[in-house]
Image: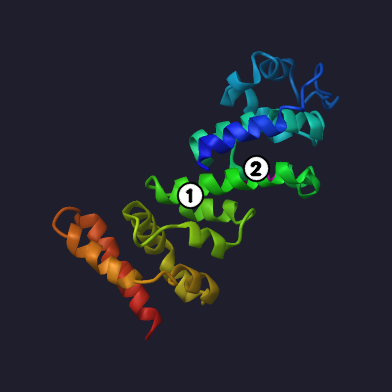
Amino acid sequence: MGKQENINRIYEVFEKYTLNGKLDACPCGCISEKDENKLYSRNLKKLTEDDLAYYARKAITTWGNIFDYKDFLPRVLEIYSQKGNSGLIDLGAIYNKLEYGNWREWEEGEQIIIMNFVKSCWIESVNQKLNNDIYSDLTDFSCFFSQQELIELWNYPTNKIALRNFVNYFYHNGNYFIRKHCETELAHLLSKPNLIKELEKEFFRIESKDEEYSSEISVVLQLIESIGN
């Protein structure tokens, strides 16, 4: 199931949670009338990133309860999916709210659709578009899945976009992993069949077309080779 299909399913699963009146807010004044008005300004599916960003940080702890959060959650996740961690609503913050709300005790169907959604976002971020921020993404997605599971879903070296993302990631972080003796991380990253062969093929394929990328591949190959020495 793709990302948009998962989003549609999330709306269906959580539609039984309906906001009744205004949310209880912290009496200290940290939530302004302007912020409140944004939250009630339009239909759930039409709420904007700006409308929901402040609520997403304050939800459950100082603004509303867990049932209110479940009502807004489909739109929060949908907005996150549009910009990823470059937007005002990031996955780490979403995970923190889910944890605070004991989401592992929610109905099984609610847990499953959230996990499916997160998985679809990871697959898109590493396999379907160039991503220069995989290090932070990997950290956030690791809250939901093990690193090994995430790497298994990362379709390098056969997928060219995924391979370029791997090259970018290892080019910037491989030396650190080697110096810090991150054996488990390295074992996961380098466990893909035919990785070196595909990197070499990609190097010769683009050597005369993209000097910067071919140079990064060369460095990555040298780093991988150094691990065995």
The answer to whether 215 is drawn above or below residue 81 in the figure is: below
Res. 62 in view: no
Q: Nearer the viewer, residue 15 or 173?
A: 15
Q: Identify residue for label 2.
A: 113
Ranked by sequence position, the earlier of labels 1 and 2 is: 2
Compute the Cα span from label 1 to label 2. 15 Å
User: Amino acid under label 1?
Assistant: Ile
Q: Identify residue for label 1.
A: 123
Magenta stretch encompasses residue 18: no
Provide the residue span drawn in magenta: 92-96
* Rendering coords of residue 90 (x, y %): 59, 40
* Rendering coords of residue 218 (x, y %): 26, 67
Picture residue at 29% right of the left edge, 66% below the top: 199
The answer to which quarter of the image holds residue 215 is bottom left
User: Amino acid under label 2?
Assistant: Ile
* Rendering coords of residue 226 (x, y %): 36, 80
The answer to whether 129 is drawn above or below residue 62 in the figure is: below
The answer to which quarter of the image holds residue 229 is bottom left
